[in-house]
Amino acid sequence: MRLSRAFLPTLKETPAEAQIVSHRLMLRAGLVRQTSAGIYAWLPLGWRVLQNVARIVREEQDRAGAHEVLMPTIQSAELWRQSGRYDGYGKEMLRIIDRHDREMLYGPTNEEMITDIFKTYAKSYRDLPRNLYHIQWKFRDEVRPRFGVMRGREFLMKDAYSFDLTAEGAQHSYRQMFFAYLRTFQRLGLKAVPMRADTGPIGGNLSHEFIVLAETGESGVFYDSRFEASDWASTVTDYDDVAGLKQAFDDVTSVYAATDEMHDAAAFDALAPESRREGRGIEVGHIFYFGTKYSAAMGLEVPGPDGRKVAPEMGSYGIGVSRLVGALIEANHDDAGIIWPDAVAPYRAAILNLKQGDAACDAMCDQLHAALGDDSIYDDRSERAGVKFADADLMGFPWQAIIGPRGAAAGKVELKRRATGERDELTVEEALVRIRT
Ligand code: 5CA
C-alpha cells in the first residue's frame, strides 16, 4: 500500500481526553475514532490489527475443538425472561422496542441465545459434549466508559459456550478453554496470568480471569512470582488427554494468583516474601463454569444413557478481542509510539523513501514494495525524512526499510527493527529475508 494513497490519518496533537497511553496512541496513530461515548469506528490500521487478533483467537478456539457460529447482536427480551436475567441485568442492558412494540435488546452476552439454539438440535447425550463460539459485537451501557476500547460500550468479544453430560465432562471442557486461553495470549506475546475470580452476573462457582499485568489496569491483583517465568501454555499438546489436562491445570492453579475480590490474605502471606507480587492488571479473558443454571431454567434437557432426562452442564468463556488491542499497546510501546508484536502487526514493514524522485531511491523502493506486497506500507509522500521516521515509529511497524540516495547508490537498504532500534545496512535480498522470517 502506498502511503500517499492510503487512509492512515495520524494526529499531531495528543488528544486531551485520553488518560492512558494506549488510548492516546490509538487516537494519534489513527487506529480508531470515537463516534459516541464508548463507541468507536475502526480505521484501516486498527481494523487490520483487530482482525489479526481475532484470527489468533479463532485458530486457538478451533484447535481446542470449539465450533464457530455467528449469532446476531439483537436479541429478544423473551429469551432473557426465561433465564430470569431480563430484570436483573439492569441499566447496563440496552433495551430496544421494535415497530411492533416487541421488546428487544442489544446483546451484552449470549448464554440464553446459545442455550435456546442448542436446545433445538440436541436430541440425546450423544450430541454432547459440544463447544460453540462466536466473535461478535456486544453492547453494555457502562456507567463510565473509559480508556478508549478498554472499557467501551460497544466492544468485540469472543464468547464460547460448552455443553456436557456430566460435571466431570464440563470441568474438562473448562480446562480445554483454560489452556486455549494460555496459548492464545502467549501467541499474542502477552503474559496473561490466570486468577481465581468472582462470577458476578454470569453465575456459577468456578471462574478464572486472565489478567495482563499493567499499572494502568483496572483490577488489583496478587500473585506468585512464578507466573513471571513459567511457560504453562506449552505444557498441553493434547486437548483430549483428560488426565494430562487435569494434571497440568492443577499444576498452574496451585500457584497463588487472585484478583482483589477473591484475595486470600492468609494464603498470600504464607508465600516466601520474595515471591509475593502485588499489582494491577487488565482483564482480557474470563471463563465460567456454572453447571445447569441456564439449561435448567430454559428447558434444555436430553435423554442420558439410561434414558433419563438430564440438563447439560455448561460453561461460558469470554475474550475481550477489542480490549486486547489496547492491552497490546499498553504492553508494547515507547515514547515514540506503538511497537507491534509481529503476530498482530498491521503491516510487517514500512518502506521509507528519503528522496522521492531520486531514480535509484525510487527503483529500490519499488523493488522492495513489489516483493513485500500487501504486507508493507510504502511511504512515498513528498515529506521530510523526519516526518516519515516519526510516523513509522508512531504506527509501530516491526521493520523499517530506509532508503536514501547514498545507500541506494551503493545498493544498500538500512533496515531498522522498531522494537530494539537496531539498524543494519543490507542488500535488498538480505533485507527481504530478514523481514520475512
Ligand atoms: N458470558 C461471559 C463469558 S463469554 C462474559 O460475558 N464474560 S465477561 O463479562 O467477563 O466478558 C468477557 C470479556 O469481555 C472480559 O474478560 C473483557 O475482556 C471483555 N469486556 C467486558 N466488558 C468490556 C467492555 N466494556 N469493553 C471492552 N471489553 C470488555
Image (cartoon, rainbow, N blue to C red):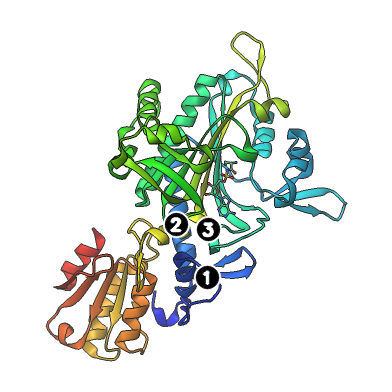
Q: First in sequence: mark 3 or mark 2?
A: 3
Separation of disc 3 and disc 2 at Cα? 8 Å
Instruction: Tell me, for residue 18, which label it has, or none.
Output: 1
Which of the image's four quarters has the N terminus?
bottom left
In the rendered image, is residue 268 in sight?
yes
Task: Please state the horizontal and vertical placement of residue 72, each as a whole percent of the image.
Answer: 66, 48
The reply to whether the C-beta atoms of the residues labelled 3 and 2 are less than 8 Å apart is yes
Task: Please state the horizontal and vertical placement of residue 85, each as a whole percent of the image.
Answer: 73, 38
Residue tagged by mark 3?
A: 150
Give the residue type at disc 1. Answer: Ala
Q: Residue furthest right?
A: 100
Task: Please state the horizontal and vertical placement of residue 300, each as a whole percent of the image.
Answer: 69, 26
Residue tagged by mark 2?
A: 327
Badge 2 marks a residue whose secondary structure is helix
Separation of disc 2 and disc 1 at Cα? 15 Å
Label 3 within 8 A of ligand 1 by Cβ:
yes
Residue 48 in the image: above or below residue 273: below
In the rendered image, is residue 63 in sight?
no
Instruction: Tell me, for residue 425, which label it has, or none.
Output: none
